[in-house]
Every structure is written in structure tokens, then in C-alpha cells.
Amino acid sequence: MEICIEQNRTLSEPCACLVVACQENGQLTASAEKVDELSGGFLRRFLSYGDFTAEAGQCQLLYGIPGIGAERLLLVGVGSEKKLSEGKLQKAARALGREIARSELSEIHLALADVAVAHRSGAAANELWLRGILDGQYRFDQHRQPAKRPRRSLRKINILLPESGSEGERQEWQQSCDLALAISRASDWARDLANQPGNICTPTWLADQAVAMAQARGIAYEILGPAEMEELGMHLLLGVAQGSRQEPRLIVLHYRGGAEGAAPIVLVGKGLTFDAGGISLKPADKMDEMKYDMCGGAAALAAIQAAADLALPLNITAIVPASENLPDGKATKPGDIHRSMAGLTVEIINTDAEGRLILADALTYAKRFNPEAVIDMATLTGACVIALGHQTAAVLGNHEGLVSELLQAGRSSQDRAWELPLFEEYQEQLKSPFADLSNVGGRPAGTITAACFLSRFTEDYRWAHLDIAGVAWQSGDNKGATGRPVPLLVHFLQHRAKAH
Ligand code: BES
Ligand code: MN
Ligand code: ZN
């Protein structure tokens, strides 16, 4: 995808498709006004028919408009508010993206700089427009017949900036384009990894994909197998994997964009390539969606990719424990006790609470890198979907500053999160009569007790946990991975990079 900024372009210059925004109340944005003027009142006449109401997200493609250079005019409705809200902007941008994909447009000229957006500079709004449009282009059709795929796809986006802009402003816009592109590319990759079915996306395959990405960008990596895990005493990770014929992997990437020796930010992501629940077998309904149980891992890898593409001046390490969780004669049984790499023993009451087990050993492994901060993300609990639905991820952590940075990154990226408490009292629920810890804490506060479990392995550093069970993928007609929380992570990293 090529994105380029054009200043001083007149609307009478030829192009394939010009995109302008329209407001619901008949108010025209500056570019829509210009189009109306050049076309001898065509646009106002069209709007007067009332077919197109310009409600946020409504799109209309028009052909053969006199006086303007564009072969096609694509109108996008932005509603009636004086300033477009961030939510409406995202809705409009995604709808625009889908319309562009549906019409198989390969190049567009965007004249959206004149849409005022609440709480956002023009450049920051541009990031959201671009991300929404790019989101609409995403497809996962590699397992379909080629004939069913579209003939053309979007290849170039031109951004029209008003003449008045200074050089500094132009730079800010360029950065917003770079950021949008890096985020989209990374979340599309995370979505590709996650949408891949479990018979292809195994721990070994996931490790191969990570290595290929790392090699292409000169990122250092290490891949650990069962022998190395045994050596390290990672019996929680091994215990989850022992019911599967697929070997587990610990995927570790080191992006070194910061000063030599500077403490890294460590991203740990749950990489359960298929979670059947183990001996505590899940019900059949929607079990296919448990191929998405590696979305946290995919996000950690993708965030590293984006950091490299943006050349962020930070050291970042990604750690992805990858395994399947299946029932088998060799599988861990309820009541089994395993010793973690950290030394704590765990009674496995429910083999379906496996994410916290593989994360615990990965979080212990993180210590050796003397991290500046550790953030883990995981599709960890069904309880999180009940608490926050599919809109918002949960954040919990042992460091207030880190948690608030993540909440802020959620707001600035519109990939939002909300804090849940990690009060000591909840730890009570994890008591076991036979081991140091139980792996489940009962029905109440399931997301919190899962985080409490993790907190027992993260006492030596600043840590925060993102439960992305509700946001990582969509079910139903639009089934598919969302790429979340890649935007949040990239905003967090970019903010950290600026602070340095
Ligand atoms: N991967 C699941 C969590 C999950 C379930 C995410 C459904 C999204 C949708 C996780 O491994 C799991 O099974 N968690 C259990 C924990 C319970 C046994 C304490 C859960 O949430 O039911
Ligand atoms: Mn599970
Ligand atoms: Zn799981």
C-alpha cells in the first residue's frame, strides 16, 4: 500500500476517485462545497433528493459528475454533530473502507482534512480515517478458490491537504500516515496468523512465521523446544502441552532499536494455537473459535513488527509460549500438581484454565532480560467477555503508572481498555489444599483471579496484563480476528519512544 500526501491540489485535476465528506444537515464541508461549485450545483441537487442522508457511515459512489477531474466521486456521511466523535469517525471510516473494497477501487484521493473531529488534531484524525479504510480492505481468502477473489484491490491512497499547511504540519501528517500503515500492516499480520486454522497454525508453524518476520527485518530471535523447557523447569508449559502431539515452542524475539544495554519492554502473549480445554473438555458449540486462543501471542509478535517498521528507538522483547491444549491419555488430569519454573507448585483443578499456566512460565522467563516493564496479553477468561463485552479489553497490573499509560494508549488508538482491581483479597480464592496455588479461583471475579494467578509470577518487575478475550475476534457473520490489541500496543510503544 502506498500512501502519499498532496498539498495544493485542485479538485479539477484528473483522478480515479475523489472522496469527500457530507454532513447530515445539508451543511457542506469545504471540499464538498468546492465540488458543488465546480459541478454547477450537482452535489446540492443530488443531496436534495434525500436518498443519501449523510448519516455517519453512509456511502455513495457517483459517476459522471461534470466540472471536476475525478472519474468517480465517493461521498461518505459523517452525521450531524458539529465535531465528529471518534466513535462515529471510526464507523464512517470502516464503512468507507468496505465501500472501497466492494467497488474494487485501486486508487483514491481523500479530501477529508476539512472534517472537524472532537478531541483530535487533523493528523490524529487522519490516522483513524486511514486505519478504518485499511481495515475495510482486509480479507482472509487464501483457502478459497482464486475465482472467488476480487479482481482489483486498493493500492494507493492520496491525502489532500489544504494549501495553508506549514512544513511542520505536513510532517505531522506524514507521521500519522506512517503510524496508520504500520499499525494496519501489523494487525493484518496478526489477523492472518489468528485466522489460520489450527491444523495449519500449530506452535511450530507459529514459530516459523515469527522467525520469517524477524529475519526479514534483522530482528534477533530464539526458539525453545521441549528439551530446553525441561532444562529450565517450565513444567507448567510442558504440562499443558503434554496432551498434544504437537511440540510446544517458546518464541522469543528481540528488537533492538534502543541504546545498547537499555532495559527492554517485554511483551508476553498467550499462544494457545488450539484450546479444546484438555481433560476438562469444552462444549462443542463455538469450539472452532478456540483457534483464536493465540491472539495475544500474535499481537506481541505483530507489535514487534510495527516497532521495527517505525524504527522506534526502544528495545522490545516478545515472548510467546505456544502450545495446544487437548484431551489425551497423556494429558494433565484435574488434580495433577506441576512445579512452575519459578518454583511454586500448582494444583490443576481445571485443565481448561491453561493460559495462566503457560503464561506463568513465560513471565518467569522474562525476568532474565531485566525488563523496564512487562505487558502480557491473553484471551484468558470467558468472564472478561461477561464483564466488558466485545468492546473493551481489561487491564490489571501491579504498577499504577504502567496501567494508566496503557489506558491512555487505548484512548489515543481507540482500541480501548478498562481497569479492573487487583486487590490482595482476591488472592484467597487461589488457595489449594495440596499445592502452593490452585489454577482456578471459582466463579466470582474470574478475570481478576486469573490476573491474581499471574501476579504471583511477576513480583520482580513492573507488570500489566491485558485480558483480550472479548476483543480479539468477532463471531457470527463477520467471524474473524480483529487484530486487537495491536493498535493499543503500538500507541503505547510510540508514546514510550517519544518520552525517551
Ligand atoms: N481461552 C479460554 C478463555 C476464553 C473462552 C476466551 C471463551 C474467549 C472465549 C481460557 O483458556 C479458558 O478456558 N478459561 C476458562 C477458565 C476457567 C476454567 C477458570 C474460562 O474462562 O471458562
Ligand atoms: Mn482454556
Ligand atoms: Zn485458553
Image: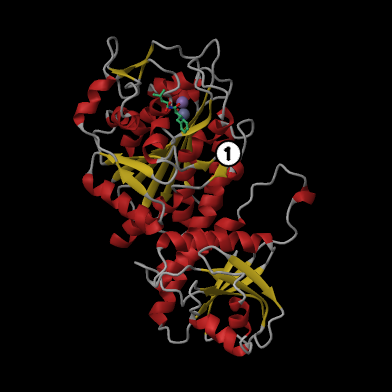
Number of residue marks: 1
Q: Quadrant of the N terminus?
A: bottom right
- Residue 464, image x and y in percent? 30, 41
Q: Quadrant of the C terminus?
A: bottom left
Q: Quadrant of residue 320?
A: top left
Left or right relative to 262: residue 23: right
- Residue 392, image x and y in percent? 39, 45
Left or right relative to 182: residue 106: right
Q: Quadrant of residue 285?
A: top right
Q: Nearer the viewer, residue 104 or 495?
A: 104
- Residue 403, image x and y in percent? 27, 46
What kind of colouring is applied to the model shown?
Answer: secondary structure
Residue at 53% x, 36% y is 292
Q: Is residue 382 above or below residue 95?
A: above
Q: Nearer the viewer, residue 481 or 362?
A: 481
- Going by the picture, which residue comes out furthest to the right? 147
Question: Counting other residues with Cα less than 10 Å from the Cα at mark 1, is it few (<14), some (14-19), or many (20 or more)?
Answer: some
Is disc 1 placed on a helix, strand or loop? helix
Q: Nearer the viewer, residue 114 or 275?
A: 114
Residue at 49% x, 22% y is 277
Residue 401 appears in view = yes
Q: Is residue 274 above or below residue 8?
A: above
- Going by the picture, which residue comes out furthest to the front? 49
Q: Is residue 55 above or below residue 142?
A: below
Residue at 32% x, 62% y is 498
Q: Quadrant of residue 18?
A: bottom right
Q: Which residue is mark 1?
A: 208
Question: Tag 1: residue type?
Answer: Asp
- Residue 239, image x and y in percent? 45, 18
Check mark 1 vs ligand 3: CB closer than 8 Å? yes or no. no
